[in-house]
Image (cartoon, grey):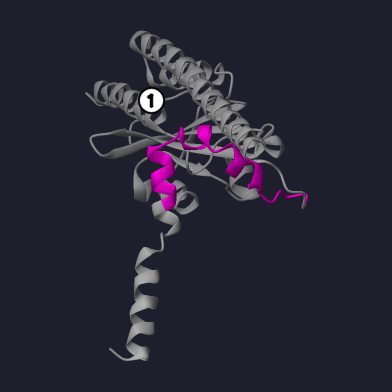
C-alpha cells in the first residue's frame, strides 16, 4: 500500500473514532454519575458565563436548576390563576342559568343577563344588544339594533359565529359601551345563538389591554351565548304565538 493510501486510511480511522457532541451528551445523560469519579476532569472543566467570567460545572448546574425552578413556579401560578378564573366563571354561569329560568319576558332576560354577568370580578363592563325582531316587545331601557347595523360593525362575530376576543377600534368600543367606554382596553363579543341564528350580542369589557385576547379560551362565553339564545328564542316564540 502506498504512503498516500496509508495516510488516508489513518485519517479515516481517526475520523471514525471521533465522537459527536450528540453522542457525548447521550452518554452523559445515560450515566449521570460519570463525574463522581472524575475529580481531575472536573477540576479542569470551566464554562463561560454571561459576565465573561468562567464558572465551574457545579455552579452552572445550580444556575440551570434555579432557572428551571423559577419557570416551573411561573407555569404553576398561571395554571392556578386560570383555575381560579374558571371557577369564578362557572359560578357566574350557574347563577345566570338559574336566573334565566325564572325570567318571564324578553326585557327580564336582557336585564338578568347583563346584571349577572356584570357581577363577575374580571368583567368591568357588560352590555347586551338585542337584534330587532318583528313583534318583539321590550322596555325602552333595553338596547336593540338592526341586524344589518350589527353585521356592519362586527362582521367577524357573525362570520365566525363564536366569541371574538381582541382589540377593536375606538368607535366600536364607544358604541358597545356608551358609559365608561373610554376606560375599556380589551373586549369579548359573544353572539347569542339559537338554531344557528344570532339573536343578540353580549359585549364584555375589561380595563386591561391583554385580558380579552385572541388566545383566551372562550368555552364558557360561547356556552353562555347558547344558553341565553335558547331562553330568548323560547320567549320570542311564545310572544309571537
Q: Would you place residue 93 above or below residue 133 in this image?
A: above
From where the camera sits, is residue 63 visible?
yes
* Residue pictured at 61% horizontal, 34% vertical: 67
Q: Would you place residue 56 above or below residue 232 in this image?
A: below
* Residue pictured at 48% horizontal, 23% vertical: 139
Image quarter where the N terminus lies is bottom left
Using a 10 Å C-alpha cutoff, classify the residue at mark 1 as few (fewer than 14 neighbours), some (14 to 19) or many (20 or more).
many
Asked whether 47 falls inside the magenta stretch, the response is yes
**How far from the left and from the top, in percent, is residue 146?**
43, 44
Asked whether 75 falls inside the magenta stretch, the response is no
**How far from the left and from the top, in percent, is residue 236?**
30, 26
- Mark 1 falls on what kind of element? helix
User: What span is in magenta?
Assistant: 24-51
Question: In the visual, does 187 lie left or right of 201?
Answer: right
Q: Would you place residue 135 above or below residue 239 in this image?
A: below
Q: Which of 34 and 238 is in front in this view?
A: 34
Image quarter where the C terminus lies is top left
**How far from the left and from the top, in percent, is residue 19?**
41, 59
Label 1: which residue?
224
From where the camera sits, is residue 133 visible?
no
**How far from the left and from the top, in percent, is residue 82?**
49, 24
Q: Nearer the viewer, residue 140 or 102?
A: 102
Amino acid at each position: 500500500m502506498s504512503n498516500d493510501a496509508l495516510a488516508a486510511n489513518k485519517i479515516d480511522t481517526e475520523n471514525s473514532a471521533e465522537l459527536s457532541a450528540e453522542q457525548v451528551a447521550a452518554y452523559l445523560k445515560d450515566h449521570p454519575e460519570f463525574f463522581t469519579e472524575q475529580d481531575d476532569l472536573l477540576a479542569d472543566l470551566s464554562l463561560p458565563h454571561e459576565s465573561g467570567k468562567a464558572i465551574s460545572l457545579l455552579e452552572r448546574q445550580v444556575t440551570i436548576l434555579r432557572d428551571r425552578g423559577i419557570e416551573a413556579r411561573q407555569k404553576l401560578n398561571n395554571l392556578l390563576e386560570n383555575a381560579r378564573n374558571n371557577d369564578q366563571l362557572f359560578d357566574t354561569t350557574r347563577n345566570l342559568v338559574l336566573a334565566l329560568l325564572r325570567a318571564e319576558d324578553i326585557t327580564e332576560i336582557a336585564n338578568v343577563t347583563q346584571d349577572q354577568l356584570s357581577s363577575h370580578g374580571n368583567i368591568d363592563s357588560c352590555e347586551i344588544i338585542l337584534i330587532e325582531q318583528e313583534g318583539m316587545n321590550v322596555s325602552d331601557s333595553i338596547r336593540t339594533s338592526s341586524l344589518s347595523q350589527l353585521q356592519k360593525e362586527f362582521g367577524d362575530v357573525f362570520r365566525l359565529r363564536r366569541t371574538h376576543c381582541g382589540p377593536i377600534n375606538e368607535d366600536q368600543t364607544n358604541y358597545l359601551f356608551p358609559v365608561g367606554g373610554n376606560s375599556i382596553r380589551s373586549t369579548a363579543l359573544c353572539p347569542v345563538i339559537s338554531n344557528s341564528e344570532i339573536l343578540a350580542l353580549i359585549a364584555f369589557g375589561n380595563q386591561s389591554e391583554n385580558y380579552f385576547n385572541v388566545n383566551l379560551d372562550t368555552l364558557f362565553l360561547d356556552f353562555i351565548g347558547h344558553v341565553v339564545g335558547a331562553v330568548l328564542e323560547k320567549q320570542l316564540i311564545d310572544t309571537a304565538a
